[in-house]
Image: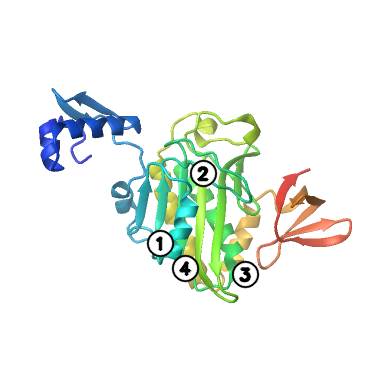
Amino acid sequence: MEHATVVVSGTKIAQEISSNRSEVWRLIQQLRGLGVDVAGHPATGYQLRSVPDLLLPEILRPLLRGTIFAEHLQHFYKIGSTNTAAMAAAADGAPEGTVFLAEEQTAGRGRGANSWESQRSTGIYCSVIVRPALPPSEVLVLSLAAGLAVQSAIKQVDSRVNPDLKWPNDLLIDGKKVCGILTEMNSEATSVRYIVVGIGINVNQANFPKELGAISLRQLTGSEWSRVELVAALLKSLDREYRQLLEDPNARESILRRFVENSSWVQGKAVRIEDNGSGFEGTTEGLDQRGFLRLRTSNGTQTVLSGTVRER
């Protein structure tokens, strides 16, 4: 990548990595299988035709200087679930700001028992570890802040795209899901040990199974997006929201206010709440001070603590 336009001989690369030309050929084929555009062959040498849109730490680190996420970036070509790996690493003492990024997930997870469609090198599959000095009751606010961070990052890359925030953890475009957020926590009664915020964004997928009700940014705009640019914008935005939550006593009120302002779902929307086989209907009436959804029903106002929100 440092010499992207130069043809480099297999012998030279072999010397650089203390190997041999046949191993270089094998590795070049592996890179091509991952979608990296490498021209040439053993007789003529190799040339990187274009910088790959891979979420590599070497590419992202300079873009994230000054954030808590710059120093502990972990990248996987294939993984079961970035959230599962991050939760295990956090339990083993991984530092705050550790980021897990994957090109492909074989067991990507959404809320509940839902899976997350994770096509190779087309979406963003990202989980971050934070260790805030917060009570467990504040974790929902952090999840809502993550939604605001995603929305801000997408708009920063293309100001024409303005996703709708759906409480508590989805972003929609034209009523279809473009992003899901899965926040998991390990805590004591009064304090958080660690939180993993998992973010999946549909970026360059060409299509989805119809039953998923999903859309990608590429499908919306008709052009490819740089995943590197979007991940950098996302992690910088998430860093800003997180620092503000820890340092500014008014941050929680700001997050709740901005979430309401940027969502068509939390005020005046006729919805049905489905939770563990049961459900009830009503009209949304904003958020309470903890970030839970308020619903006006035929039996009075109820607070929605969990469940899937569907438009009626």
Q: Position of residue 17 (x, y in %)?
A: 16, 42
Label 4: few (<14), some or many (≥20) within 10 Å?
A: some
Q: Position of residue 98 (x, y in %)?
A: 39, 59
Q: How far, Cα to Cα, is label 1 from label 2?
A: 23 Å
Amino acid type at circle 2 is Ala
Tell me the residue that label 4 is attached to: 131
Q: In this rendering, would 97 be left or right of 14?
A: right
Q: Amino acid at mark 3?
A: Ser
- Label 1 element class: loop
Q: CA distance from mark 2 to mark 4?
A: 25 Å
Disc 1: which residue = 97
User: Which numbered disc flags the more N-terminal residue, 1 or 3?
Assistant: 1
How far apart marks 2 and 3 lie (CA) works out to 29 Å
Point out the tag, 2 or 3, that comes first from the N-terminus: 2
Measuring 32% from the left and 36% from the top, which residue is drawn there?
A: 52
On residue 137, the disc is 3
Mark 1 and mark 2 in contact? Answer it, CB < 8 Å.
no
